[in-house]
Image (spheres, rainbow, N blue to C red):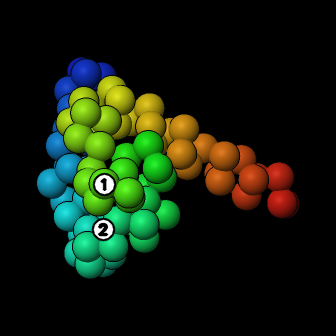
Amino acid sequence: MREEGRDVDEFASRFRHEVLPLLQEYAYEDYRELASYLGPGFIDAEEQRLVSERIEDPESLISGLIEEFQPAASAMDDSD
């Protein structure tokens, strides 16, 4: 059985090292586009940088992703 804390850390690590680089490559240095994928809580488009304190902390990363994408999931459920 896996520990919950380890799962959080593993997910955050995979997101930072596998998913995020792909999104950055896809957006090709366009931080506004990258912010449209992840949300403004993770990307500072004006400063053209990642919000590293949000991305580096596993708990903050996961809670931010939930906040950003939960409304979209709820809206899809309501359309049925």
Q: Where in the figure is residue 71, as x and y percent of width and height? A: 66, 46
Q: What's the mark number on residue 47?
A: 1
Residue 1 visible to the viewer: no
Q: Disc 2 on helix, strand or loop?
A: helix
Q: Position of residue 56 (x, y in %)?
A: 21, 36
Is label 2 or label 1 in front?
1
Q: Residue at 44% of width from left, 43% of height from top?
A: 41
Instruction: Left or right? Give the position of 68 relative to 60.
Output: right
Q: For mark 2, does the 10 Å Cα neighbourhood hold few (<14), some (14 to 19), or many (20 or more) residues?
A: some
Q: Is residue 58 left or right of residue 71?
A: left
Helix, strand or loop under label 1: loop
What's the residue at 73%, 58% (across, down)?
76
Q: Is residue 62 above or below residue 4?
A: below
Query: Label 2: which residue?
Result: 23
- The amino acid marked with disc number 1 is Glu
Viewer-proximal residue among 13 and 42: 42
Residue 1, by quadrant, is top left
Residues 68 and 53: in front is: 53
Question: Which amino acid type corresponds to the residue marked 2 in the rendered image?
Answer: Leu
Badge 1: how crowded within 10 Å, few (<14), some, or many (20+)?
few
Q: Is residue 3 above or below residue 36?
A: above
Which quadrant would residue 2 be assigned to in this image?
top left
| Residue 58: x %, y % from top left | 27, 31
Name the image quarter holding residue 21: bottom left
- Most extreme residue toward the front is 46
Can residue 64 be seen here? yes
Residue occupying the point 31% across, 35% down: 54
